[in-house]
Amino acid sequence: MDRIDHDELKAIISNDAFDNYTDEQVFRDAKYYFKSMKSAPFFGEETLGIYVDIYKKLGERGYAPALYELGLLYHNGEFWLQPNYEVSLGYHQKAAALGNPDAMFELYVYYVRGIGTEIDEEAAMDWNLKAANAGSDRACYNLGTFYATGNGVPQDMDVAVQWYEKASQMGNFRATETLGLMYRYGDGVPEDVAKADAYEELEDLQREEFRQSLDEM
């Protein structure tokens, strides 16, 4: 895979030459260099700040993944960048408004924990549902757990299984593990050893794929 090199990325932001590339390509390569270089102790704001500026410019262009990445950046901070939860919240709100399911899920987390804002459980549940409907496997898993336990919603094991199934189909190994245990022990569903075995086999595959994705980052 051909990458835009560091000097070329500097030129893109210096000359505002984003129209010569796709937003996806610029974001992909800026994120790659940022992640690769930030582990080195001699790279700081002078170098890494270029990629932050690229994220911000892409955000101005309406590219939601860059806004989401900025939300994460200002939440976690770097040794040269202080965390700022209110700024982080703002970026996630902008990304969510553009339909980014990961940002929607982060808003659930922020409102349920009061990160950068007041705790608002109603808003949190609303954002979790929006995230699930937009394709967030984490949000689907959450809804499965909410309905299984009656947390904030009427307890309904049939609905819980439906949400766990959606999360599992998206590759969420925790949801797959939960389904396997439910069918293994007949917890909220009819006991079914064959289904339990199938879910456990799928869980192993999903966990391995997850480990490989971490190695590739």
Image: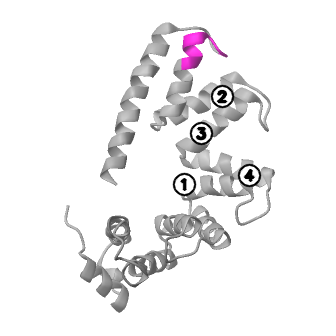
Mark 1 surroundings: few (<14), some (14-19) or many (≥20) residues within 10 A = many
- Mark 1 vs 4, N-terminal side: 1
Q: Are marks 1 and 2 in contact (CB under 8 Å)?
A: no
Magenta region includes residue 3: no
Mark 2 residue type: Ala
Q: Of circles 1 and 4, which is in front?
A: 4
Residue at the image point whose x is 30% and y is 76% from the top: 21
Q: Which residue is mark 1?
A: 102
Residue located at (79% from left, 50% from top): 121
Above or below: residue 184 compared with residue 79: above
The x and y percentages for residue 13 are 37, 85
Picture coordinates of residue 200 (x, y %)? 44, 21
Viewer-nearest residue: 15 or 6: 6
> Which color scheme is applied?
one colour
Which kind of residue does numbered mark 1 sit on?
Asp
Which residue is under mark 2?
Answer: 160
* Disc number for residue 178: none
Q: Earlier in the sequence, mark 1 or mark 2?
A: 1
Q: CA distance from mark 3 to mark 2?
A: 9 Å
Foreground pick, 216 / 188: 216
Q: CA distance from mark 3 to mark 4?
A: 16 Å
